[in-house]
Structure formats: C-alpha cells, structure tokens
Amino acid sequence: MEEKDGSTAYGASLAGGGFNLNKFVRQPQTIVRLLSWLFALVVFACITTEGYINPIHSPEAKCVFNETDSACHYAVGIGVIAFLACVGFLVLDVYLPFMSNVQERKYAVLADLVFSGVWTFLWFVCFCLLASLWGRTHNASSIPQDAAQATIAFSFFSIATWGILTYFALGRYRRGVSDIAVPTYTEPPLDHPYPPAPTSYNPTTYTPTTYSVYPSSGPDVQQQTPFTSSLQPQEDVGYQPPNY
C-alpha cells in the first residue's frame, strides 16, 4: 500500500525514486483494485448477456429481477462506471510516484477516497435491490438462475472490495506528508563560550584617583603679551610725482 523503506508522500515514494512494477503489482491496494475491476466486469456482463428474458405475456424482453428493468439498468450502470474507474485509478496509482507536486497528490488521493466511498454505498444499494427483487420473482425456474445469483453475489463482493479501497485511501490521506523528514537548523556549539552572566547586580562606589604635583626646576616662563604692531600710522601727504 505504501513505501516502507523511505520517505513517502500520500502513500507513494517521492518523485525521482523510480517505479517498481513487481512491487506495485504485489501491493494490497493494487490487488483489491484488480478484484473490484473483475467483480464489476462480472456484474454487467451477466446482466447484458442473460439478464433479460422474453415473458409469455409480453413480446418485449424484461429484466430477470421481477421484470424490473430499472434494476438491471442500475446494476449495469454502476458496473460499467466501476469498471472504467478501476482502470483509471490503476493508471493514477502508477503515475502517483512521478508527481512532484504534493498538492496534486493530495487531490488524487482525495478523488480516490470520495469515489471509493460513494461506490461502496452504491454497490450496497445494488445488492439490497437485486436481492429483494429476486426474492419476489415469480417462475424463477424458467429463468437462468446462475446469472442472476452471480450478479447478486458479486455485487456483495464489490461492497467489500470498494470498502477496503476506501479504507486504503483514507489511510493515505491521513498520513499525507508526515513521513517526510523536514531538516531543522541547529546552531553549532561555540569553541569558546562566553562566561555566564551574573544572576544579580551589585553596584559599587566609584573612587577617583588622585595624583601628586610634579615639581618644576626651571625658571618660570613668562607669558608673552599678545602681538601688537609697532608701525606708526603715516599721514596722508598726497600724491608726489617721481623725479626723473
């Protein structure tokens, strides 16, 4: 039903893992789906070949199940659809490991779950209907009983097989992608860890440091006065022409 030796997504191996035909054929889900395909084939084949008779009082062919044509039409209809659906879901099971999109796998498994559940109920209705009509059929001795009884029996078997397919699909849908190991980042340990922080803080009083005065042995350096200009202002004597 699913891969046991590696990561899976919705009951199938991850994309790129290849396809093993021998392993696929031996899966319980594949075997049950092939049985459902066979049972559906038997049901509609029995009705289409020997499910109608020509009664004495009517020139038209009537259904062997109490001359109720709708019962035969119903059994043939769900049998043909189940036959085709089994083929389609078998192809989908083969293609499922090649789906790289997890969302597409989810929709495929969900479609299998819904269809299998609905057809389990429809086969149950078919079995109850055919069994009830066959019990009320008159002159059953002149009717090919083997075909009618085979139709009822394989309708009952189809309830079991489609119920098992529903269980398998539900299991795959619940598992989802939980089997895939998602890598998590862990910070590498430090070679030189920092010292642990103190649990409590005790404030201390700051004491300034005092320094002694360094003695000076040289003469005091007088401070110079600021720079002042020694030039006297010149009077304006006017323009004097040069002498040649």
Image (cartoon, rainbow, N blue to C red):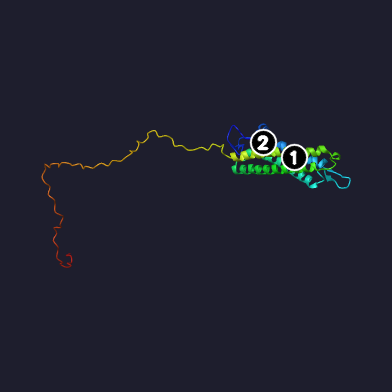
Occupied quadrant, residue 126: top right
- For disc 2, the neighbor class at 10 Å (few under 14, some 14 to 19, many from 20) is many
The quadrant the N terminus occupies is top right
Of residues 141 and 166, the one nearer the viewer is 141
Residue at 78% in and 45% down: 71
Callout 1 secondary element: helix
Residue at 67% in and 36% down: 29
Q: Earlier in the sequence, mark 1 or mark 2?
A: 2
Residue 44 image point, x, y percent: 78, 41
Residue 185 image point, x, y percent: 47, 38
Residue at 70% in and 37% down: 160
Query: In the figure, is residue 120 to the left or right of 102?
Result: right
Query: In the figure, is residue 85 to the left or right of 68?
Result: left
Of residues 116 and 53, the one nearer the viewer is 53
Residue assigned mark 1: 155
Occupied quadrant, residue 122: top right
Q: Amino acid at mark 1?
A: Ser
Residue at 77% in and 43% down: 132
Q: Amino acid at mark 2?
A: Gln
Query: In the figure, is residue 130 to the left or right of 171?
Result: right
Q: Which mark is residue 4?
A: none
Residue 120 image point, x, y percent: 69, 42
Residue assigned mark 2: 29
- For disc 1, the neighbor class at 10 Å (few under 14, some 14 to 19, many from 20) is many
State the CA–CA distance, disc 1 to disc 2.
19 Å
Callout 2 secondary element: helix
Residue 115 image point, x, y percent: 68, 43
Q: Nearer the viewer, mark 1 or mark 2?
A: 1
